[in-house]
Image: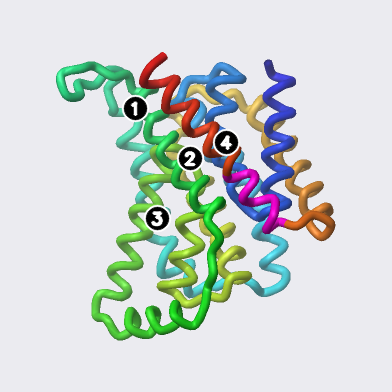
Amino acid sequence: MIIIGCIAFLVIGLILGLIGGGGSILGVPVLVYVMGYSADEATSYSLFIVGMTSLIGAIAYLKKGDISVEAILQFALASLTTVFCVRKFIMPNIPSVLPFLGFEISKQMLIMIMFSILILSSSISMIKKKTYNRINEVKWDEFARSPLGLPFVILLGVVIGFITGFVGAGGGFIIVPVLIFFLRLNFKKAIGTSLCIIALNSLIGFTGNIGQQKIDWIMLVIISSVCIVGILLGSLLSSKVSSQNLKPAFGWFTLIVGVFVLIKEILL
């Protein structure tokens, strides 16, 4: 199962390199259903893996100047604080069994159901074709004049931090539109800034787990290295493969995975 898991993470890294995001969201299901980790451990390990792979991706954009420091200061500070608090204080104090509408659900089931919802949302965003046009710029101009502009961006940062901390996923499919619509970054700079925010969020969130649970560092480094090899290979192949055609296909695949996780946790 370890070999299968490593192959899966190689593919996840490859997808990250080819389409610039989305692949890392499958890390938790692989860790839970293939490699046999608990949901709590899987979300923790996923934060480290996502953080390291996103950092590798962000470095390439940093060299090209496609990262907005201003956007990071406005958006990431709130999300960084939130993700650390979720991992350090909230996750360890969630009871192993919780009452819900007269039933009892386990902590693992709660995490995986929330994760399946996130996978389904991510898959829809990949399947649906996005067009960023002048209408969006008009919306931004209206937003910029609103006195709620910066507080709303901070609120969105808190939401992203909570999602990242709770399910161990980067949330790039949410961050990129926020950076484009509310911080008026162009698409390329939004991708680079998103990778930087995801790397910071994930790695800071992971530090919240240190001392809270036992960490298999050797396995974690092996998985992360395999994933990084995948993202480097994907980056080399990206010029030869159409990401616009690949992204919807991968979106349908993640949709199937999301439905599988939901059915397995609720019905099986």
Q: Position of residue 119 (x, y in %)?
A: 48, 40
Circle 2 crowding by C-alpha within 10 Å: few under 14, some 14–19, many from 20: many
Residue in view at x 67 percent, y 48 percent = 16
Structural distance between the alpha carbons of marks 1 and 2? 14 Å
Identify residue for label 1. Answer: 110
Structural distance between the alpha carbons of marks 4 and 2? 8 Å
Identify residue for label 2. Answer: 119
Labels 4 and 2 touching (C-beta < 8 A): yes
What span is colored magenta in the figure? 243-251
Q: Mark 4 or mark 2: which comes first in sequence?
A: 4
Along the viewing direction, whichever of 109 and 47 lies nearer the viewer? 109
Say above or below: 86 vs 160.
above
Q: How many marks?
A: 4
Structural distance between the alpha carbons of marks 4 and 1? 17 Å
Q: Quadrant of residue 74?
A: bottom left
Say above or below: 177 vs 141.
above
Circle 4 crowding by C-alpha within 10 Å: few under 14, some 14–19, many from 20: many
Identify residue for label 3. Answer: 79
Indicate whether residue 252 is drawn in magenta.
no
Say above or below: 43 vs 86.
above
- Give SS at disc 2: helix
Identify residue for label 4. Answer: 26
**Could you tell me the amino acid type at mark 4?**
Leu
Residue in view at x 34 percent, y 27 percent = 110
Structural distance between the alpha carbons of marks 3 and 1? 22 Å
